[in-house]
């Protein structure tokens, strides 16, 4: 049985902090000599990443485009965070939250390339609200257990229904088992892309909650200044020419430029 995927945006921090650290700087010249750059990813976390060749996920496709822009091959290190984080020493982790205080000195963040967060999905036929604070009393809202979103929703009259996995939660919204749910816009977009006959309504309620909205970057391990500079330049080019937006669109995910 394949491992079930959890909230990828939240596992990024845990992965980076768990990866082994040494004092040696990873230089651009070293990467150019070996001709490849590596990325850590979950093999069963669509739409983020997958080891399925036909649907690799937007993290893998963006990493490939970035490597190609740098004239390098991409090597993917498949990792289930709790099992292998301590043994992997990859160059990059996609969708790293743009908060440097979350990471140690071995991690450098690239320029942001997408906006992430925790949005609201509403079941077909259910009335929507614009913000978390507007959730009505009695509304059944799916939440990830012990999440920040659950703390915010607890201050409303809504009735929380706990889940352990985002894919279960968005499926419950689509089937009307809950009225709404707090989860990533990427998971909502991908659900609608793969369930066109029963789409849920996506509301970017995170726009009114600063704690639930963030920019995402490439986390670079022990990168020297030249490596950071070329990655930033490549990302800027991929944003400007529409490559990154086009990759997200393949998975039904809105591109929200930071």
Image (cartoon, helix red, strand yellow):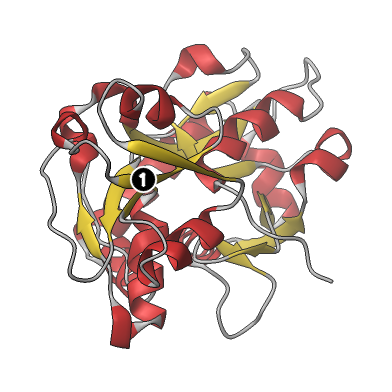
Is 11 on the left or on the right of 109, as rendered?
A: right
- Residue 7 in the image: state x and y as whole percent: 55, 46
The extreme front residue here reads 138
Query: Residue 18 location in percent, x, y?
Result: 76, 27
- Quadrant housing the N terminus: bottom right
Reply above or below: 211 against 5.
above
SS for dot 1: strand
Nearest the eye: 252 or 111: 252
For the point 59% across and 29% down, the residue is 13
Quadrant of the snapshot with the C terminus: top left
- In this figure, which residue is indicated by the disc labeled 1? 141
Q: Is residue 28 left or right of residue 120?
A: right
Q: Is residue 13 above or below residue 57?
A: above
Query: Is 143 placed above or below 199 here?
Result: above
Q: Residue at x 34, y 47 (%)?
A: 140
Q: Is residue 108 visible?
A: yes
In this view, the residue in front, 2 or 198, is 198
Q: Does residue 65 show up? A: no
Which residue is nearer to you in this view: 126 or 110? 126
The structure residue drawn at horizontal position 28% and vertical position 75%, both measured from the top left corner, is 199
Where does the image place residue 11, in percent across and percent down from the top left?
Answer: 61, 38
* Crowd rating for badge 1 (residues with CA inside 10 Å; few <14, some 14–19, many 20+): many
Q: Position of residue 172 (x, y in %)?
A: 45, 64
- The residue that appears at 55% across and 27% down in the rendered structure is 146
Say which of 92 and 30 sits in front: 92
Q: How many marks?
A: 1
């Amino acid at each position: 049985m394949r491992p079930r995927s959890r909230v990828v945006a939240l596992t990024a921090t845990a992965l980076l902090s768990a990866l082994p650290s040494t004092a040696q700087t990873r230089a651009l010249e070293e990467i150019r000599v070996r001709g490849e750059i590596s990325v850590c990813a979950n093999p069963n976390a669509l739409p983020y990443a997958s080891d399925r060749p036909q649907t690799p996920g937007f993290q893998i496709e963006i990493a490939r485009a970035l490597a190609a822009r740098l004239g390098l091959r991409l090597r993917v290190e498949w990792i289930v965070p709790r099992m292998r984080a301590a043994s992997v020493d990859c160059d990059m982790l996609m969708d790293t939250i743009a908060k440097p205080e979350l990471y140690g000195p071995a991690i450098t963040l690239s320029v942001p390339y997408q906006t992430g967060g925790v949005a609201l999905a509403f079941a077909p036929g259910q009335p929507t609200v614009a913000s978390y604070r507007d959730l009505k009393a009695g509304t059944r809202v799916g939440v990830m257990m012990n999440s920040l979103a659950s703390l915010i929703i607890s201050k409303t009259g809504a009735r929380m229904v706990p889940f352990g996995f985002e894919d279960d939660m968005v499926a419950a919204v689509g089937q009307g088992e809950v009225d709404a749910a707090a989860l990533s816009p990427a998971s909502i977009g991908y659900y609608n892309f793969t369930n066109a006959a029963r789409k849920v309504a996506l509301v970017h309620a995170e726009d009114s909650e600063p704690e639930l909205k963030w920019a995402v970057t490439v986390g670079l391990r022990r990168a020297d200044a030249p490596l950071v500079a070329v990655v930033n330049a490549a990302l800027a080019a991929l944003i400007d020419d529409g490559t990154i937006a086009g990759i997200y669109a393949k998975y039904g995910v809105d591109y929200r430029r930071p």
